Image (cartoon, rainbow, N blue to C red):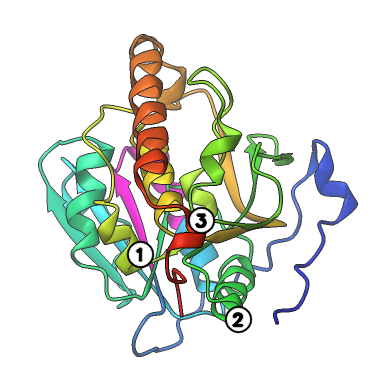
Amino acid sequence: MGTAPRRLPPGLTDRSPAPNLNLKATYVPRNSPKITVITPTRLMPNRLPYLELLHVSLTAQSVEWELVLALDGAAPARLPRSVTRDRRVKVLELPKVGAASARNPALTLAEGDWIQYADDDLFPADAFSVRHTYALERGLGWVAGWSADLFEDGSTRVWRCPTPPGVHDRGAVWTYWPTPQATIPLGQTQMIARRDLVEAACGHGGLPQGEDFLYVGTLTALSAGALLPVVTYFYRQHGEQLTRTHDHDRLESASRRFAWQAGHQLRRLLPPVDATMPTAA
């Protein structure tokens, strides 16, 4: 059995200075990646430093990884040299198609056995190892950790999602999303998941937003997984987030209803958990 997950330092429970992430921008040649990180980006000039810091946080991971950057209508010449000179980084050029449609073809380039979706945010140094080890030891299809909001002043605040820590049967996560208007049960960037399950879940649905809700609902309906009570993702909070635009608010209700309904219907149609074989070896 796996060891107990590392407990959060008490200082992360409130808005407080961000912890030292022990990031080192060093390159160590590696062979086959175990985790593929997929990040859609429009390479907006004001966000390029964020992308560079995402890459730096990846170099601190002890689990082999690769990064697939899906350029959503952006010119590759705008990519920072510090990122492109890393042989673990792949670049997929696309017309402007939106985040969901950028993530899906990027999945076809993945060589890792596990998938991690990310934006231009940050990972703590043990984000991959703690979840990857737990998943392999328990034979799970996905493992998530907590995320923490990272504010522009460097302070953080842990988001404790409605899904409680522990192991969850397939389909159980959606029981923590009682209505479309309620807080989502789990975030996609909190999770690593087996690539075969991500492919079976058909990636991200064709929604202009809320596609991540749909992804989480489908994926967690296909396999048992776990949520560990440890921060594995720092989510940037700033004034230019797409979630703060007027168009986002106009579409939010419809996207939520669609994703909520899809997750519940999938859970209803799949055979009961005790009537199926184990979801992972």
Looking at the rendered structure, the kind of residue marked 3 is: Met
Please state the extent of the stretch shown in magenta in the rendering.
36-53
Mark 3 to mark 2: distance in Å?
Answer: 16 Å
Secondary-structure class at tag 2: helix
Residue at mark 3: 191
Question: Where residue 68 sits: x, y (%)?
Answer: 29, 62
Whichever of callouts 3 and 2 sits on the residue coming sooner in the sequence is: 2
Label 3 close to label 2 by CB (< 8 Å): no
Q: Residues within 10 Å of mark 2 (few under 14, many from 20)?
A: few
Q: Viewer-nearest of labels 1 and 2?
A: 2
Q: Viewer-nearest of labels 3 and 2?
A: 2
Mark linked to residue 137: 2
Label 3 close to label 1 by CB (< 8 Å): no
Secondary-structure class at tag 1: helix
Mark linked to residue 83: 1
Quadrant containing the N terminus in the rendered view: bottom right
Question: Where residue 208 sits: x, y (%)?
Answer: 26, 27
Looking at the rendered structure, the kind of residue marked 1 is: Val
